[in-house]
Image: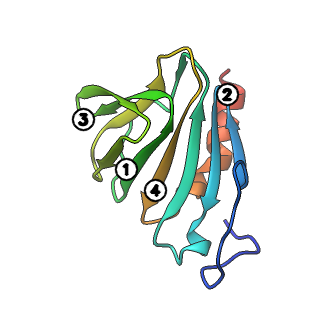
Amino acid sequence: MKHKNDHTEALILTEGQGRIYNCGTMTAIFKADENETNEKYSVSEWWLEENSDGPGAHSHEDNDEIFYMLEGTISFLVGEKWIDASKGTFLRIPANTTHDFKNKTDKKAGVLNFFIPGGFERNMPSIVEWFEENQ
């Protein structure tokens, strides 16, 4: 996705700023896309409303993912095991590892995500469309 920023410019975003994608009870806020990082990574926040599912179990063939819990507790599937991650928890999901996440609590929860290498943001318009059609 191309926009006015490129990898030669500093990015400074305050809370809530970025490209926002509404996916039902889940909201993604992209802070840095591949054109802003020379295709090395993408950075996004994912916010889940209370008692809500995430994207569903999936894996990425060529991409590692890093998750860092910002607020609340999110349950993560890593391989075949579910773990509860609270604020400050760090997870690295290697390529080809099945994973998922969901919020099973009564409070909104958020996680910071690094997608390595970048490019995941290219999927966001179709992901938003899927959630709009399947709610």
Separation of marks 2 and 1 at Cα, in angstroms: 22 Å
Which dot, 4 or 1, sits closer to the camera?
Answer: 4
Residue found at x 47% / y 17%: 104
> In the depicted view, which residue is nearer to us: 78 or 11?
11
Which quarter of the picture shows residue 57?
A: top left
Q: In percent of the image, x 61 and y 73: which residue is there?
A: 36
- Locate residue 79, reporting x and y percent: 24, 35
Is there CB contact under 8 Å for labels 2 and 1? no
**Which amino acid type is shown beneath numbered disc 4?**
Phe
For discs 1 and 3, the disc positioned in front in the rendered view: 3
Judging by the rendered image, the residue that carries numbered circle 4 is 114
| Mark 4 to mark 2 CA distance (whole Å) | 21 Å
Colour convention of the picture: rainbow
Q: Amino acid at mark 1?
A: His
Is 129 rendered above or below residue 30? above
Single out the residue that lies furthest toward the front: 88
Residue type for callout 3: Gly
Secondary element type, mark 2: loop
- Amino acid type at circle 2 is Gly
Above-or-below relation of 128 to 135: below
Kindly check if marks 1 and 3 are in contact, taking CB atoms under 8 A apart as contact.
no
Between 3 and 29, the residue placed more toward the observer is 29
Mark 1 burial class by Cα count in 10 Å: few <14, some 14-19, many 20+: some
Report how far apart the C-alphas of labels 1 and 3 lie in the structure.
12 Å
| Residue at the disc numbered 1 | 60
Counting residues from the start of the chain, the first of labels 4 and 2 encountered is 2
User: Alpha carbon of mark 3 to alpha carbon of mark 4: how far?
Assistant: 19 Å
- Residue 119 in the image, given as x and y percentages of width and height: 53, 62
Find disc 2 in the rendering and name its residue.
Answer: 24
Q: Secondary structure at mark 1?
A: loop
The residue wearing badge 3 is 79
